[in-house]
Image (spheres, rainbow, N blue to C red):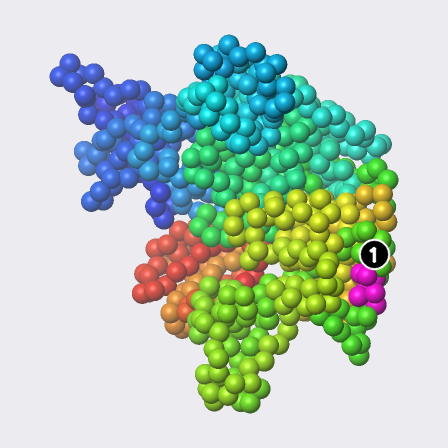
């Protein structure tokens, strides 16, 4: 429409709301608030606003101010009011999120609101910036500190608080002195301290801190990596930091953070799962002048929002977070680090589906700063980018310090008697290492007691009534559990079919292995790390502390053990029952299996003591195992890339996966058939099909697990050799799909660059 000559320029407000709608909506400015004609405070893109929507009201994000609207301005409604005096998202943040929503074909409103703390997605004010703190009472300020010489921690804490008359946040005291709740209680009980609320001036900026610990010296490879990235600060430069396990990648990160801070820049460090890497946070806190702002879903909502505000205000020099942290506003961002860049957890699998690794690269490109992707087992996509010189390739081929690469051997267990799933050879090696004062790590990627419960009389098997899956026995809870939909039932005392009582457990999970090990190794400290044993907050940290103190001689668990942990006392790693993953149907399965084996192997021999790895298998001749043993991960990756090129699979093609699910299998398949017809056939308003000669559709086919949670799932695969070609197709196709009539109970999603073909 042509501009209204009576309407002020920029008086059309483009607003996105959190709804499954691809477009934003036009509104008018709020009505005058007084008879004098004064208007609401000036509106800026990135502000939260409250708008009428349908029969109710919604929180929206102002995207832009326009002169015109595609709609009749007479039909537009005014917004009710702005919710904040200033934008919560800056111009650079809006640009990044709009790009991500467009690339992944996701609703712009859902993408924008996923970047905000939970409270800010509602019509609530920004959280009170004041935090709990303590200050000295008159008695505390007058006390002679020498009277506390027999309580050195109380003396140190009181001296620190007295140095800041306005008071110190409790979080800053913990950062400076370590956990000090008991000391605070004692000083408050004596009337020397009192509680207060404080607006923090910055991350411990007003309180003297313990001098950061000095770092180890860098070897030649580490120094070269730091030098190359530091030289690129101030411009877009993507790097792969390809370092074997134990090669000192974290030390490289810390030196780069220091280099960025020297330029006044913030650093964003993204990790797959913050709960699995407590040592990283501890190390950053001990080495950097200020503790990092931490962002992950395990935090209380208030703590997470305060950390978000510290980052968005520029007060936090370092932000450490999981995948959603890739969108946190950072006004001084100058460096992005992505640790364990190969990890599938960096891909969001529900709602707004995005890859934090790939968004991080795009953010660095838009902003003009370096991005470093670190891994001991780089994804084949990233490795190909390094091999073709799209990324700088930084190699750390040697372990840091005196640590040696562990020796790995395959142990053929065919026709071998096993106890607790362990061969006689592995059991003897475990006893030898334990007797020498070392620690042993056993990896079994299956939690629970047993994966199958069956009736020996009639053959009944405990199946999930809602999924194409077996129920896993959790004996401690005396329940059968579906690990896919979460359905559970009590452990039956008799067979539900024939009422026989000879129920047998087949297979072995970590719970059963834990029980059997305690019988095999009486008096030996054993710790189990899996999702069941670490559900309670703080339990993982407690178990890891026991390992570090040497109270644990045998550590067993699932892939939780493979990520981000340093176990200097572990000299023997046993990998049990990994054979099933060698024959999975997903084309990424060999890559994921190789990465898992190498990551678990890397837990051995990380200190001065040499390490050894024993991989038990019934398929010692398997090409993947032989390749890893002979050529390491690099050799495996070279072969795998050649196979991917021959098969025209990523990174040599680009994929999108359309998934559909419904209460009936026919409903999901019918929708996908319609989707394929739209892609490949002409339409009334379109002479040519959407999919040109470079875009191919495959399917629809049932998902690898067709029935899950009582719903039937199917999928349609889209492949193209050119990314721009695929994006052009998806732009029109996704709009056409949203226009299709929706059958009852049907849900569908579009996954661009899918990482799992489930």
Q: Position of residue 635 (x, y in %)?
A: 81, 54
Callout 1 secondary element: helix
Q: Which residues are magenta?
A: 425-431
Q: Tell me, yes or no, if residue 275 can be seen here.
A: yes
Q: Position of residue 598 (x, y in %)?
A: 75, 54
> Looking at the image, is 361 positioned above or below residue 465?
above
Q: Tell me, yes or no, if residue 363 can be seen here.
A: no
Quadrant of the rendering where the N terminus is positioned: top left
Look at 56% across and 52% down and name the residue there: 534
The prevailing secondary structure element of the residues shown in magenta is helix
Look at 81% across and 51% down and name the residue there: 437
Look at 58% across and 28% down and name the residue there: 175
Q: Nearer the viewer, residue 564 or 334?
A: 564
Q: Residue furthest top?
A: 142
Q: Residue furthest left?
A: 35
Q: Is residue 642 magenta?
A: no
Q: Nearer the viewer, residue 730 or 526?
A: 526
Q: Residue 17 vs residue 358: left or right?
A: left
Look at 80% across and 56% down and name the residue there: 434
Q: Position of residue 399 (x, y in %)?
A: 82, 42
> Looking at the image, is 738 positioned above or below residue 24?
below
> Looking at the image, is 243 positioned above or below residue 261?
below
Q: Residue 126 vs residue 156: left or right?
A: left
Quadrant of the rendering where the C terminus is positioned: bottom right
Q: Residue 355 vs residue 523: left or right?
A: left
Q: Is residue 429 magenta?
A: yes
Query: In the picture, residue 549 is in which quadrant?
Result: top right
The residue at which mark 1 appears reads as 435
């Amino acid at each position: 429409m042509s501009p209204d000559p009576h309407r002020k320029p920029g008086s059309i407000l483009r607003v996105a709301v959190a709804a499954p709608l691809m477009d934003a909506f036009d509104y008018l400015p709020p009505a005058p608030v007084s008879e004098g004609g004064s208007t609401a405070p000036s509106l800026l893109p990135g502000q939260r606003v409250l708008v009428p929507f349908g029969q109710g009201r919604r929180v929206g994000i102002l995207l832009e101010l326009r002169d015109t609207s595609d709609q009749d301005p007479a039909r537009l409604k005014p917004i009710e009011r702005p919710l904040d005096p200033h934008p919560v998202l800056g111009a650079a943040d809006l640009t990044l999120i709009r790009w991500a929503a467009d690339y992944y074909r996701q609703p712009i409103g859902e993408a924008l609101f996923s970047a905000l703390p939970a409270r800010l997605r509602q019509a609530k004010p920004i959280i009170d910036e004041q935090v709990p703190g303590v200050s000295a009472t008159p008695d505390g300020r007058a006390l002679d500190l020498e009277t506390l010489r027999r309580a050195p921690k109380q003396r140190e804490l009181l001296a620190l608080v007295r140095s800041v008359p306005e008071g110190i946040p409790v979080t800053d005291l913990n950062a400076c002195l370590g956990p000090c709740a008991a000391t605070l209680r004692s000083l408050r009980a004596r009337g020397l301290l009192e509680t207060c609320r404080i607006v923090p001036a910055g991350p411990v900026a007003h309180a003297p801190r313990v001098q950061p610990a000095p770092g180890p010296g860098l070897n030649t490879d580490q120094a070269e990596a730091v030098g190359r990235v530091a030289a690129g600060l101030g411009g877009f430069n993507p790097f792969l930091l390809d370092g074997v396990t134990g090669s000192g990648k974290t030390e490289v990160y810390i030196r780069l953070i220091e280099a960025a801070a020297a330029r006044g820049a913030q650093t964003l460090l993204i990790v797959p799962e913050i709960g699995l890497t407590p040592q990283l946070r501890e190390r950053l806190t001990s080495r950097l002048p200020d503790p990092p702002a931490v962002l992950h879903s395990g935090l209380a909502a208030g703590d997470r929002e305060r950390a978000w505000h510290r980052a968005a205000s520029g007060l936090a020099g370092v932000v450490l977070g999981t995948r959603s942290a890739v969108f946190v506003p950072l006004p001084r961002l100058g460096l992005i680090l992505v640790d364990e860049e190969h990890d599938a957890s960096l891909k969001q699998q529900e709602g707004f589906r995005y890859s934090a690794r790939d968004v991080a690269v795009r953010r660095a490109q838009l902003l003009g700063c370096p991005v470093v992707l670190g891994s001991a087992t780089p994804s084949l996509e990233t490795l190909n980018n390094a091999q073709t010189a799209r990324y700088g390739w930084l190699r750390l081929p040697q372990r840091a310090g005196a640590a040696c690469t562990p020796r790995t051997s395959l142990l053929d267990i065919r026709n071998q008697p096993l106890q607790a799933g362990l061969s006689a050879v592995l059991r003897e090696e475990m006893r030898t290492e334990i007797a020498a004062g070392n620690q042993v790590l056993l990896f079994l990627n299956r939690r629970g007691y047993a994966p199958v419960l069956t009736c020996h009389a009639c053959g009944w098997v405990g199946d999930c009534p809602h999924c194409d899956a077996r129920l896993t026995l959790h004996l401690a809870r005396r329940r059968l559990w579906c690990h896919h939909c979460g359905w559970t039932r009590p452990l039956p005392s008799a067979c539900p079919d024939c009422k026989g009582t000879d129920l047998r457990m087949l297979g072995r999970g970590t719970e059963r292995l834990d029980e059997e090990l305690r019988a095999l190794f009486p008096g030996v400290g054993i710790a189990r790390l899996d999702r069941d044993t670490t559900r309670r907050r703080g339990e993982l940290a407690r178990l890891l502390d026991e390992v570090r103190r040497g109270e644990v001689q045998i550590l067993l668990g699932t892939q939780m053990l493979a990520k981000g942990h340093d176990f200097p006392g572990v000299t023997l790693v046993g990998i049990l029952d990994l054979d099933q993953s060698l024959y999975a149907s997903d084309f990424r399965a060999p890559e994921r299996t190789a990465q898992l084996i190498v990551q678990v192997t890397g837990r051995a021999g990380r200190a001065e003591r040499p390490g050894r790895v024993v991989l038990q298998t019934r398929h010692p001749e398997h090409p993947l195992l032989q390749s890893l043993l002979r050529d390491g991960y690099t050799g495996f990756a070279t072969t795998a890339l050649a196979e991917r090129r021959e098969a025209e699979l990523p990174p040599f093609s680009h994929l999108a996966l359309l998934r559909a699910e419904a209460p009936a299998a026919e409903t999901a398949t019918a929708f996908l058939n319609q989707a394929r017809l739209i892609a490949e056939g002409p339409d009334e308003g379109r002479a040519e099909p959407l999919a040109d000669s470079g875009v191919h559709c495959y399917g629809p086919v049932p998902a690898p697990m067709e029935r899950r949670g009582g719903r039937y799932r199917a999928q349609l695969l889209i492949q193209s050799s050119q990314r721009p070609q695929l994006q052009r197709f998806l732009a029109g196709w996704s709009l056409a799909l949203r226009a299709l009539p929706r059958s009852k109970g049907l849900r569908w999603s579009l996954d661009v660059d899918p990482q799992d073909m489930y």
